[in-house]
Structures are given as structure tokens and as C-alpha cells.
Amino acid sequence: MDMRECEVIAPNFKKRLSGVTSTIIQLVPVQSRALGIAVLGPGLPASLPRLRLSQLPGLWRAPRGRMVRVWHARRNVEMLPGIVMRDLLRMPLKLVFTSASQRRHTAYTKWLIGRMDAVVATSARTGSYLDGAHEVILHGIDTQRFHPAPDKAAAKAALGLPAEQKIVGCFGRVRRQKGTDLFVDAMIALLPARPGWTAIVAGRATGPHESFEAGLRRRVAEAGLAERILFVGEHTNIPPWYRALDLFVAPQRWEGFGLTPLEAMASGVPVVAADVGAFSEIIVTGSGETGIIVPAGQADAMARAAGALMDEDGRRIAAGANARAHVAARFSIENEARALEAVYRRLMGGSPASGRTPSSSATRL
């Protein structure tokens, strides 16, 4: 990207794919419709507008039509370079930090956050762990990429899943923090009495978590359910797997935000989720139900909630339709992009870079 057109930089200084990286990958193409935005760092698709490290000296000059540009960090390792460039090298930058963490910050992290020009929390619960002023902007989802299947049976068959079975799924890295064992235990309790259901675990176990997955597979085999609780591995093209589901379970013990319930609901799939991350802020219970929230770490409670939706077809189907409508109305990625754009424009001042038209006023979620 031409530095004169670059108004916002989204650094990504972590090679391995993570939720933060996924957020950047999904957001930047939408943001680029109204802003001169570029990514910087490894582990990102070549299709994204990007800067090279050799272009960083260009940060001493503000972009065309602006007094400053924005450096939007999402990790400590990205906040620190922004502080150095703004305060020591005197580059015309404003610093934004998005926090997804739901734990007390270390003194070092508090020091970094205290030097930001604006702070965004991804949920109200996340915001409760921040000491200073902040704005809550919930994540959004690409509702065109994640959408209901026009033919559920065909969606299952295309993935090699039994088209005649109802499918309940749990997606994400296979590890204790993600609660994969809680899902497996719940399915071992539920499936013997529900022959019309099959469960799938989609995700990868890495390093020390490989033995954890091996132990889960042994428990499934010992229960005689190896043909009905399937470990399907990691998939880069995940939307078709959501479209094959009839029910999604998010069993995490801890989560910063957690996009998987939104991805499932956008696909017309109701959700049973642990009360972690932003799940209680995005899932509707009661009237207009889109799913059920259960206490974190309790396999029995999860099994009861999942069993209720598995056994009541009308309730489950209605919750899936409600889920799609809810996400489309409140959690589109365009809403998130507009809300962030409002933060950027407030900090940058001036008129937009040449050739760009500001989008409509930002939406605060």
C-alpha cells in the first residue's frame, strides 16, 4: 500500500493462527471499503492490503488529508512498538488497543494500556477488567460467508456425514481450556438414548494437547461410540461444517470473546454455551431464544441443555431461525467495522485520504 493512502495500520505479530488473527483477516477487507487500512506482520493472507517493514520510515509523514494515522494493536507485543514509534521516534500516530482478555492484567500490561489513545473492549465483561475509559464494541460476523444451508441433508452428505442423522458439533482447538472433554462427556451421556444423533469434534490438538485428544478418543471407544462421536480434524473452510449442524455446543472453560457461537447462529444453528467470554451477551435466552447458557465447567448442565434441544425439534428449529435473524440484525461484521471507524476518525481528525468516501455514521454496539 502507498504510505500516503494508509490511514490505519493493523499489526499482527503472531505467526500462528489465533482468534485475534482471524478477527484481522475478517475485518480488514470490510474496513478497506471506507478507510486506507493495511496489515503489517506474518501469518496473514497475501490478499490483504499490507505494508512492508521497509515502509515504516514513511510513518514520519501523516497520510494525505490527516494529521495522524492510527496504529491498532490487539496484543502487548503490538502496543509496545506503537508507543516507541509515537513517543520516542515522534511519529504522528494515535494508538488504539482492543482488549479481549477476561482476567486481571499484569502491571506491565496496565502500563501499556495506560498509554493508549483509545481502548476498545470486545464485551462488557472484558471491559470490567479494564481500569480506565474504554468503549465496548462487540465482534461481528460475515453473514454472507456464514449462512444457513438451503438443503441440510445435502450439506451433510457433501462432508461425508450421515445425511439421515441430526448432527451436534463442537468446533475449536482440542484442549482442556476449550472444554472439549466436557462436550465428549455430555455426548457419551446423551447419545445412547438418542440413536438419531451423531456428534462431531472439529479442530486440532497441538503439542502437549495431543495426549489430551488421545485420551478423549479412548473414552469414546470404551463407551462404544466411536462411530457416533467423530473427530473430523481441523478445516480451513469451516462454514460448510456449520451448515451441516442441527445444534452447536460451545463448552469452553475460559474464553476472551469466542466467535464460534456467532458463526453457528449466523448459519441458522442454535447454541448451548458455557457462561464465559461474551456468550451471555450474544445468545438470547427466553423469548426469542437463540440458545441456552449453562454454568462453565459443568458437563451435567451442558448435557441437560443439549438434551432438551435435541429432544424438541420445534423448539430447536425455531431457535435456529431466531439465531440467524439475531446475528444479521445486531452482529454483522459491517456493524463492527463502522463502530471501529468512528473511533479512528475521532482520533485522526481532518478529511479522509484522497479518493475515499467516509461510510455512514458508526454504530456503537
Image (cartoon, rainbow, N blue to C red):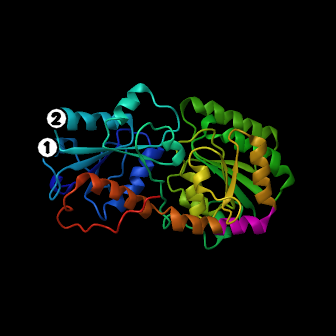
Quarter placement of the N terminus: bottom left
- Residue 320 within the magenta-colored segment of the rendering: yes
Instruction: Give above or below for 276 relative to 313.
Output: above
Q: Nearer the viewer, residue 338 or 258?
A: 338
Badge number at residue 60: 1
**Quadrant housing residue 211:** top right
SS category of the residue bearing label 2: loop
Q: How far, Cα to Cα, is label 2 from label 1?
A: 8 Å
Q: Are marks 2 and 1 in contact (CB under 8 Å)?
A: yes
Amino acid type for the residue under numbered disc 1: Trp
Q: Residue furthest top?
A: 107
Q: x and y percent of residue 329 in the render?
A: 52, 68
Q: Residue furthest bottom?
A: 150
**Quadrant housing residue 74:** top left
**Residue at (19%, 62%) from the top-left corner?**
351
Which label's residue is closer to the chain start, 2 or 1? Answer: 1
Q: Give the residues drawn in magenta, as a range.
A: 312-321
Q: x and y percent of residue 278 in the render?
A: 56, 49
Q: x and y percent of residue 107 in the render?
A: 41, 26
Instruction: Give above or below for 87 relative to 187.
Output: above
Q: Is residue 304 visible?
A: yes
**Residue at (47%, 54%) from the top-left corner?**
139
Instruction: Give above or below for 155 relative to 20.
Output: below
**Residue at (81%, 51%) from the top-left corner?**
191
SS category of the residue bearing label 1: helix
Q: x and y percent of residue 97 in the render?
A: 36, 43
Q: Is residue 226 visible?
A: no
- Residue 325 within the magenta-colored segment of the rendering: no
Label 1 environment density (alpha carbons within 10 Å; few <14, some 14–19, many ≥20) = some
Badge number at residue 89: 2
Residue 216 in the figure: left or right of residue 210: right
